Image (spheres, rainbow, N blue to C red):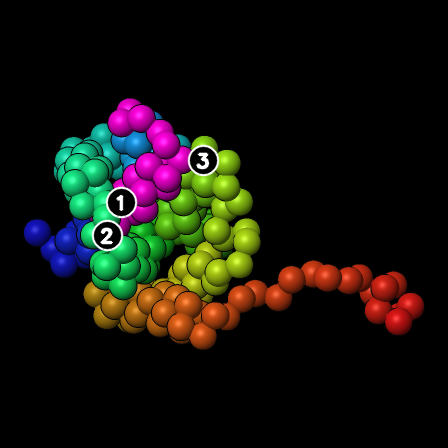
Amino acid sequence: MSVIYVLDILGTFAFAISGALVALDKKFDIFGVIIIAFVTAVGGGMLRDVLINAHPINWIADLNYLYVIFTAVMFTFLFKSKIAYLSKTMFLFDTIGISVFTLLGLEKALAIDLHPIIALVMGMVSAVFGGVLRDVLTTKIPLIFEKEIYASACLSGGIVYLILNYFRVDENINFIISAAVVVIIRVIAVRFHLELPKVKSDLFTIFKK
């Protein structure tokens, strides 16, 4: 079992818990909680595979993802009141998860000879669209559209990967460096409350002032 696979599983576990917590807060029943946890954990990878016509779809090819999701749901039910104390740990798993999901999605798209720009988008889809689907299904504004630097951290890591890949840097070293870029940007953004700029006025409004 590779380190990357272990990190992938940890990210899936963290994503599933985040989905289960949102569903519980919305007073969903057990079926609804499982569905939201499932969509959050593997929705991005599933959407990516559908878009690039890759079969079998990620969780169908590896049932361990389903086992991890069900375990995460049970963990959330049993220890919901204690998970708040694990927020930093869950944030770390979540951040590692989006970095790994980004690069795995990017590599999968490159492996079938898609253009690097398309591969970069597929990496971002893998990492963030599970959360987008979760928020849409639970009637929330998706996190990536609201405030935090999330998708842009994934894009940055993906760009670094493509650059290093162009210069034929060893694949494992490339993966570690690129994943670290995603993690560092995400941690710094949350630590210092950094946000992308918002459009508050257009050119005509500026000149009127």
Image location of residue 89, percent across then percent down: 23, 61
Quarter where residue 198 is shown:
bottom right
Mark 3, residue position:
138
Q: What amino acid is at disc 3?
A: Thr
C-alpha distance separating marks 3 and 1: 15 Å
Under mark 2, the amino acid is Ile
Q: Residues within 10 Å of mark 3 (few under 14, many from 20)?
A: some
For mark 1, does the 10 Å Cα neighbourhood hold few (<14), some (14 to 19), or many (20 or more) residues? many
Q: Residue at x 50, y 41 (%)?
A: 140
Residue at point 37%, 39% (across, down): 25
Numbered mark located on residue 84 in the image: none
- Give yes or no for contact between labels 1 and 2 (Cβ–Cβ under 8 Å): yes
For residue 66, which quarter of the picture? top left
User: Does residue 89 sit above or below 29 in this rendering?
Assistant: below
**Residue where numbered disc 1 is placed:** 17
Residue 18 part of the magenta segment: yes
Residue neighbourhood size for the residue with mark 2, other residues' Cα within 10 Å, grouped as few (<14), some (14–19), many (≥20): some
Residue 130 placement (x, y as % from top left): 38, 42
- Give the magenta part as a residue range: 13-31
Reading the image, the residue beneath label 2 is 83
Horizontal arrangement in the rendering, residue 133 relative to residue 81 (left or right): right
Q: Quadrant of residue 134?
A: top left
